Image (spheres, rainbow, N blue to C red):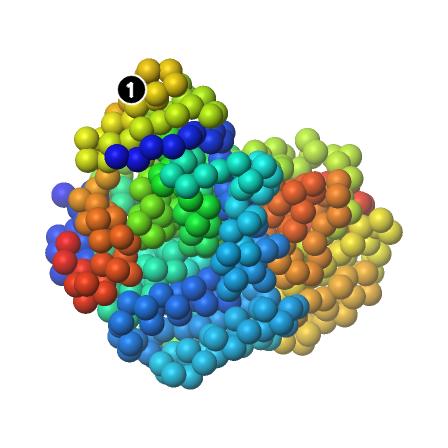
């Protein structure tokens, strides 16, 4: 069971919003890079987010670059899951590969600051603030196995190959 | 029931009867990294205990995003990559060689290949019939070590192209038009597969431009069949042996069909801050532009520099507009020198950058000031893209960019040709 606060974002949050190219010189200094997470979408996000909180977005979250640093700095900020109406392809795979759950559901009813409780195995989101209950789409089996291992690198370390 | 190009390639590479929706494990024919995503890939490669590359001669490391390095931290990232290539035997492409996608097109990609790399514009190689897609560092690290990866076999959108481009209109206008129609997530998880008489008249350079931007509609792959044009290109690059015809079955099943007549397309521009926010160049007349960029993996090829030089021959760029040109590769650089394009462009006021990604991603060189606008031939105009969230990026063709450099405002190139 995951529990935390919702930080809402709209549609089309790109990897440049999440971690822009102008910080590329910090990519080998991840703690420093993580201080800039989502800076161009909400400059106050990094100072307000706490361990376990959630990003709640609209459509096409994470579009753009293949930079895995984008889900990585989100994870480093303490975010425990991303909820979105839809997610860009590469970002989706990158987040799962880092062990960061991405849950597809209708996020319209969730307000910024709402307290959420997520049951990953039951596939449900409970908005404690509003009382609303949502279900999210199934994560494909292959991704679930990678997620369960804590990400792709731990998965490969354990199995030495794809055992899907 | 026949197969799409992607189903055919993934069937061949997985040894299964791959159909849209299936999960397959496919062999990877080429994998590569570049300097902003490569160091993380290297770290994950070693962390995964994979130790050796599956195919060193088909694995490449490109230093192209920050060239030459502007800071010591990036210089140290470059050291990591050079050391990795040295240790593993991967192909090393250092500063001055050019943008990874252009170099892959010139020297490495083959029709029918499965190509994965930690850069979203890996889709460019779809121009010559490869199933090429961008992935993150973890996926590429594993693909490099195992020589394979998993895919969900994508559905395909068939785009049938008819006719030919009018003067002043090019492949960039076509793909911007398509993205405007589909939307920035209209092809998410899918393939854009191109067909029709209209593509027969398109050069490889034009096909690379179109395939390059498939990802801006969310697509996993943008792919052309390989044909006589592909063959002639490979022969010209000294690797005719790499040619094989790759075509879809006549009775392949597509999720969606689109038809586009090239003859009615007009110069098209994507407005800030999304690529699907398109308008015609003539509708944006009067929009002041402080910087013009011609180059990148989208439009930094020889024919792009040729049209630019043709428009600017004997003319001077607008005094209030900075004009930056970055050829996509050393080969293009040399050919442009031989043909006198750079002489023409420098006389017109251009600043020439070394082959590489240049100002496209806002890492260094040509970062925009607050409130400034750039007309760029690159592929992304997201907020903050060119180094400043308070700046504005418009995307257009090389002809539109050249015309804009001349007048200092967004200009339909047909006005000056």
Residue B37 at x, y = what percent?
46, 62
Residue B274 at x, y = what percent?
56, 37
Q: Residues within 10 Å of mark 1 (few under 14, many from 20)?
A: some
Residue placed at 78% from the left, 34% from the top?
B286
Q: Quadrant of residue B186?
A: top left
Residue placed at 55% from the left, 68% from the top?
B64
Residue toward you, A145 or A34: A34
Residue B175 at x, y = what percent?
50, 44
Q: Chain of mark 1?
A: A
Where B346 sits versus A134, above or below? below
Helix, strand or loop at label 1? It is strand
Query: Do we see residue B92 in this rendering?
Result: yes
Query: Position of B333 compared to A94: left or right?
Result: right
Query: Position of B263 compared to B59: left or right?
Result: right
Residue placed at 24% from the left, 69% from the top?
B146
Residue toward you, B77 or B113: B77
Query: Do we see residue B304 in this rendering?
Result: no
Residue toward you, A119 or B414: A119
Q: Which residue is mark 1?
A: A133
Q: Residue furthest top?
A: A131
Query: Position of B86 compared to B111: left or right?
Result: right
Residue B54 at x, y = what percent?
26, 75
Query: Position of B243 compared to B323: left or right?
Result: left
Q: Residue furthest right?
A: B319
Where B123 sits versus B277, above or below? below
């Amino acid at each position: 069971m995951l529990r935390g606060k919702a930080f809402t974002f709209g549609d089309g949050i790109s990897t440049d919003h999440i971690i822009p190219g102008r910080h590329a010189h910090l990519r080998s200094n991840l703690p420093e890079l993580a201080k800039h997470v989502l800076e161009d979408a909400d400059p106050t996000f990094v100072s307000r987010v706490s361990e376990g909180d959630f990003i709640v977005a609209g459509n096409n979250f994470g579009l753009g670059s293949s930079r895995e640093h984008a889900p990585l700095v989100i994870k480093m900020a303490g975010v425990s899951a991303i909820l979105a109406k839809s997610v860009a392809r590469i970002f989706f795979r990158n987040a799962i590969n880092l062990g960061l759950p991405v849950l597809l559901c209708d996020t319209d009813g969730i307000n910024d600051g709402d307290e959420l409780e997520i049951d990953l195995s039951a596939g449900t989101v409970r908005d404690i603030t509003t009382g609303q209950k949502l279900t999210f789409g199934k994560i494909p089996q292959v991704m679930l196995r990678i997620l369960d291992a804590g990400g792709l690198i731990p998965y490969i370390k354990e199995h030495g190959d794809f055992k899907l | 029931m026949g197969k799409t190009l992607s189903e055919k390639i993934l069937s061949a590479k997985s040894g299964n009867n791959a159909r849209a929706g299936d999960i397959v494990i496919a062999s990877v024919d080429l994998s590569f990294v570049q300097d902003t995503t490569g160091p993380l890939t290297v770290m994950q490669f070693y962390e995964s205990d994979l130790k050796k590359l599956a195919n060193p001669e088909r694995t490449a490391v490109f230093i192209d995003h920050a060239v030459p390095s502007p800071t010591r931290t990036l210089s140290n990232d470059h050291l990591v990559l050079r050391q990795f290539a040295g240790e593993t035997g991967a192909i090393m492409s250092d500063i001055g060689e050019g943008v990874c996608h252009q170099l892959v097109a010139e020297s490495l990609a083959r029709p029918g290949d499965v190509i994965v790399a930690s850069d979203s514009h890996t889709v460019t190689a779809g121009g010559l019939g490869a199933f090429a897609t961008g992935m993150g560092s973890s996926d590429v690290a594993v693909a490099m070590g195992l020589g394979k990866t998993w895919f969900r076999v994508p559905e395909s959108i068939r785009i049938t192209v008819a006719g030919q481009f009018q003067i002043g209109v090019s492949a960039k206008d076509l793909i911007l038009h398509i993205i405007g129609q589909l939307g920035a997530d209209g092809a998410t998880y899918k393939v854009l597969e191109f067909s029709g008489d209209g593509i027969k008249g398109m050069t490889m350079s034009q096909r690379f431009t179109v395939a390059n931007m498939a990802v801006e509609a969310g697509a996993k792959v943008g792919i052309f069949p390989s044909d006589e044009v592909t063959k002639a290109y490979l022969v010209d690059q000294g690797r005719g042996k790499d040619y094989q015809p790759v075509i879809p079955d006549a009775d392949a099943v597509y999720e969606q069909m689109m038809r586009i007549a090239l003859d009615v397309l007009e110069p098209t521009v994507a407005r800030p801050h999304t690529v699907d926010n398109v308008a015609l160049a003539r509708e944006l007349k009067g929009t002041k532009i402080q910087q013009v960029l011609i180059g990148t993996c989208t439009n930094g090829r020889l024919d792009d520099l040729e049209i630019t030089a043709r428009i600017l021959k004997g003319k001077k760029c607008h005094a209030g507009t900075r004009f930056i040109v970055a050829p996509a590769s050393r080969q293009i650089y040399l050919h442009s020198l031989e043909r006198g394009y750079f002489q023409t462009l420098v006389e017109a006021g251009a600043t020439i950058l070394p082959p590489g990604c240049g100002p496209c991603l806002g890492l260094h060189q040509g970062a925009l000031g607050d409130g400034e606008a750039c007309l760029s031939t690159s592929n992304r105009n997201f907020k903050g893209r060119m180094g400043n969230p308070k700046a504005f990026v418009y995307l257009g063709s090389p002809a539109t960019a050249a015309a804009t450099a001349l007048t200092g405002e967004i200009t339909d190139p047909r006005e000056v040709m």
